[in-house]
Image (cartoon, rainbow, N blue to C red):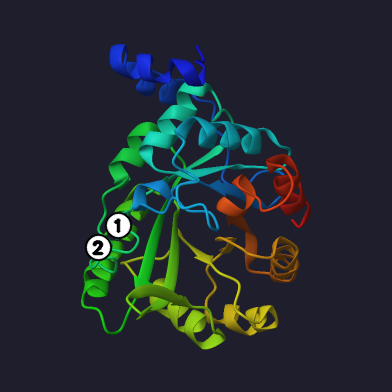
């Protein structure tokens, strides 16, 4: 039985077991489908307190609106699945929006945006056992490394153990690494070719095996550098979208990088769910066409 968005609070209050029941009966699919490519919509930003889109600081705060946009995105041809935290994935399960979709659980959300402890990004989201129990298909980790912040070491160590635990369950884990630093008190990710190359080397070596590790990488400042940067690892890669100012320029950068042999697809969130211009349908369909 599928519910509507207006039913969700009532179901959660009176029949919380409905979530586990929906997960148990969900139709599953392989990670890589017939297209040989992967298009995932990301919606794990709210759990880190990152609710802003452009100058709208609380754009993602309306849960009903976010769910509506996610359901539209997931309904579009070529969209393979979604990345989110438990609360959002469970809403989507109850809505029946995850049938035959790749479901990725977001694992570490403890490094809250703008906090003093942002680099100590502890695992406050899905654990490997949660992903396995729910019958989800993969997990995702964020690993920001600031050489001047001791909190990064805690993140690296806990990430390595999570990689091990996911591999024990034969579950893919998507590792999203950045070399970061604070500028005027705010964390900034370095997208230079050298920094992204260094982040790939560090992330690829985390854990006792890399057999189930994927990399989730940004396109470098100069998209032409990506071919050289991606020589740093044999691990499969998906591109991340992030928040973009110029949508057309972003499509051009993604399109160039998607032609590289190790790039298997994309994981894109806010720029598709809350596009600067046009509808969710148009933004998603354009991104899919790049694949």
The residue most toward the front is 55
Decide: is 73 above or below 265.
above
Which residue is pictured at 36% across the width and 14% down the height? 10
**Residue 171 visible somewhere in the drawing:** no
Which circle marks residue 158 in the picture?
2
Decide: is 245 above or below 74.
below
In-image side of 163 versus 284 (left or right): left
Pinpoint residue 85: horizontal percent, then vertical percent.
Answer: 39, 42
**Which residue matches tag 1?**
162
Per the model, the C-alpha gap separating discs 1 and 2 is 6 Å
Q: Nearer the viewer, residue 25 or 253?
A: 253
Location of the C terminus by quadrant is bottom right
Pinpoint residue 7: horizontal percent, then vertical percent.
Answer: 44, 15
The residue most toward the bottom is 194
Report if the CB atoms under discs 1 and 2 are less than 8 Å apart: yes
Which residue is pictured at 37% across the width and 15% down the height? 11
In-image side of 12 versus 149 (left or right): right
Pinpoint residue 42: horizontal percent, then vertical percent.
Answer: 52, 49
Which residue is pictured at 27% across the width and 73% down the height? 152
Which quadrant holds residue 16?
Answer: top left
Give the crowd class for mark 1: few <14, some 14-19, many >=20 residues within 10 Å: many
Tally the marks. 2
Pinpoint residue 196: horizontal percent, then vertical percent.
Answer: 50, 79
* SS label for mark 1: helix
**Residue 120 visible somewhere in the drawing:** yes
Give the crowd class for mark 2: few <14, some 14-19, many >=20 residues within 10 Å: some
* SS label for mark 2: helix
In-image side of 1 versus 9 (left or right): right
Q: Nearer the viewer, residue 243 or 166?
A: 243
């Amino acid at each position: 039985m599928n519910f509507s968005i207006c039913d969700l609070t009532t179901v959660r209050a009176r029949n919380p077991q409905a979530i586990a029941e929906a997960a148990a009966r969900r139709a599953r699919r392989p990670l890589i489908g017939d297209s040989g490519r992967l298009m995932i919509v990301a919606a794990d930003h709210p759990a880190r307190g990152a609710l802003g889109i452009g100058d709208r600081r609380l754009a993602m705060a309306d849960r009903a609106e976010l769910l509506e946009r996610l359901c539209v995105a997931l309904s579009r041809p070529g969209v393979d699945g979604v990345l989110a935290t438990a609360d959002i994935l469970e809403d989507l399960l109850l809505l029946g929006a995850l049938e035959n979709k790749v479901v990725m659980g977001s694992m570490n959300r403890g490094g809250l945006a703008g906090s003093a402890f942002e680099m100590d990004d502890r695992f406050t989201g899905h654990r490997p056992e949660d992903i396995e129990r729910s019958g989800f298909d993969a997990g995702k980790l964020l690993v920001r490394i600031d050489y001047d912040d001791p909190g990064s070491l805690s993140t690296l160590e806990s990430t390595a153990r999570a990689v091990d635990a996911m591999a024990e369950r034969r579950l893919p884990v998507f590792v999203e690494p950045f070399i970061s630093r604070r500028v005027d008190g705010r964390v900034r990710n370095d997208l230079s070719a050298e920094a992204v190359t260094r982040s790939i080397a560090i992330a690829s070596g985390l854990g006792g095996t890399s057999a189930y590790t994927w990399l989730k990488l940004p396109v470098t400042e100069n998209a032409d550098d990506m071919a050289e940067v991606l020589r740093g690892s044999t691990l499969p890669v998906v591109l991340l979208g992030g928040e973009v100012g110029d949508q057309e320029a972003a499509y051009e950068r993604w399109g160039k990088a998607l032609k590289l042999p190790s790039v298997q697809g994309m994981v894109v969130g806010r720029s598709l769910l809350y596009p600067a211009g046009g509808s969710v349908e148009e933004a998603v369909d354009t991104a899919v066409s790049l694949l």
